[in-house]
Amino acid sequence: MHRPNTPPAFAPKTPRFGTMPLYISAPTAVELVQRKGLKNCIAGIAEKIRSDFLRWHDFDKSARVANHSKNGVIELMPISDDAAYSFKYVNGHPNNTAIGLSTVMAFGVLADVATGAPTLVSELTLTTALRTAATSALAAQTLARANSRVMALIGNGAQSEFQALAFQHLVGIDTVRVFDLDPLATAKLVANLSGSGLQLQVCASAAQAVQGADIVTTVTADKAYATILTPDMLAPGMHINAVGGDCPGKTELAAGVLHAAQVFVEFAPQTRIEGDIQQMPGDFAVTELWEVLSGAKPGRQNEAQITVFDSVGFALEDFSALRFMHDAALACGLGERLALIPQMVDPKNLFGTLLNAEATAVPREVQAAGV
Ligand SMILES: NC(=O)c1ccc[n+]([C@@H]2O[C@H](COP(=O)([O-])OP(=O)(O)OC[C@H]3O[C@@H](n4cnc5c(N)ncnc54)[C@H](O)[C@@H]3O)[C@@H](O)[C@H]2O)c1
């Protein structure tokens, strides 16, 4: 006999939405960014990332779990502090665009550490582009020369416009020299950024793009030991924002570039596996970005030094971005509640949900209230 779905004797105080997380779909994320403005979103996420990196030791951190296959990788990226937990599901399949799919697709979850109840389910494809650009710009604020105005942008795919605009708004870049093996990708970037106020210079090669650049962003996708940048392309004082080499067997910088530079990373145990420094010995000297942001270690030490931010994407950036999107969606009245977890009057009577549809129905007042 099943137990009737009656309230338990202890009558717990149920939160208003119980275990119904907020859901931010891909179209909702677009509406949110349009309402708040892209610049404000990137700046807001950068600020959240900065403040979370400044409390580095509060977090239970690990390198992401990666399942590799012939065409790409699927990764899970968990992290938590005392109050909140998050994970991101993300793939990297460089050949996807040839069959009409994105190279990078992602979604993620925020949860309450005290109960384990999910509080947010969100798209993270658009949000990953925002947080990656925000992290790159945050790193460049401390590592690039203060008077940097010209950036080379090699790889003009899905991430590229976000990088260009983050560097315009947060770093002061006014000119972007662009190159991609695919001229259609470059044409798309030029069209998308035509009203941005950035001066765009289309280049015929990576070597041409880096000429005169203060900052070089590499954001290419190729599952190969690529050498987009070689030591002969470097100039004194350059800052390199290496975004595309983010997986074992997938790099963008020749080893000589890393030897010539001071290298900065997000979370060294993960970057040593996935970043451009995977080519280097295990004791190759790197500085973690949080150490620079907190003032514990120096960033750029002189105007001639070459700095590299070997970005791979760390779970803490997604934690920060998920919290930004959650708070922004609530403030804008966007998103909906998701009946992801069974809603039970008696939480011990899971079986009863099969017998009594009313027990799991979304409460009417919640349906009406939206968020
Ligand atoms: N570090 C991070 O946090 C982070 C976050 C997101 C994406 N990524 C990585 O960034 C890269 C770009 O992502 P995306 O979503 O823009 O991919 P995408 O496929 O949309 O664009 C990649 C572009 O790189 C170009 N390309 C490939 N090889 C090149 C070369 N040798 N020279 C010039 N251009 C070349 C392609 O033609 C393509 O237009 C991927 O490798 C992805 O894994 C890193």
Image (spheres, grey):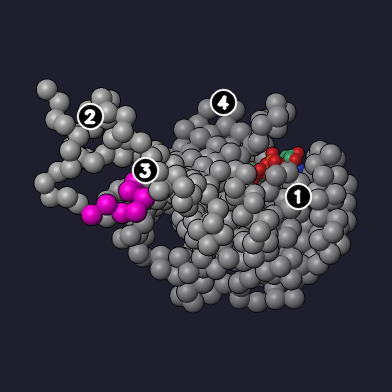
Measured as percent of width and height from the top left, residue 280 is found at 54, 49
Q: Earlier in the sequence, mark 4 or mark 3?
A: 4
Residue 146 visible? yes
Residue that extends furthest to the top in the rendered view of this protein: 1
Measured as percent of width and height from the top left, residue 42 is found at 63, 61
Name the residue beneath numbered marker 4.
70
Answer few, some or many: residues within 10 Å of disc 2's Cα (few below 14, many 20 plus, some between 14 and 19). many
Answer few, some or many: residues within 10 Å of disc 4's Cα (few below 14, many 20 plus, some between 14 and 19). few
User: What residue is shown at x 16% (from left), y 31% (from top)?
Assistant: 4
What is the magenta range?
13-19
Residue 227 visible? no
In the rendered view, would you say 192 is above or below 236?
A: above
Magenta segment's dominant SS is loop
Q: Earlier in the sequence, mark 1 or mark 2?
A: 1
Q: Nearer the viewer, mark 3 or mark 1?
A: 3
Q: Earlier in the sequence, mark 3 or mark 1?
A: 1
Say which quarter of the image contains residue 72.
Answer: top right
Measured as percent of width and height from the top left, residue 147 is found at 75, 76
Q: Which mark is residue 143?
A: none
Name the residue beneath numbered marker 2.
352
Q: So how many labels did they put on this image?
A: 4
Q: CA distance from mark 2 to mark 3?
A: 17 Å
Measured as percent of width and height from the top left, residue 272 is found at 49, 49
Name the residue beneath numbered marker 3.
363
Q: Amino acid at mark 1?
A: Ile
Q: Nearer the viewer, mark 4 or mark 3?
A: 3
User: What residue is shown at x 61% (from left), y 55% (from top)?
Assistant: 32
In the rendered view, would you say 54 is above or below 84?
A: below
Q: Amino acid at mark 3?
A: Pro
User: What residue is shown at x 56% (from left), y 43% (from top)?
Assistant: 25
Q: Earlier in the sequence, mark 4 or mark 1?
A: 4
Image side of residue 115 versus residue 89, left or right: left
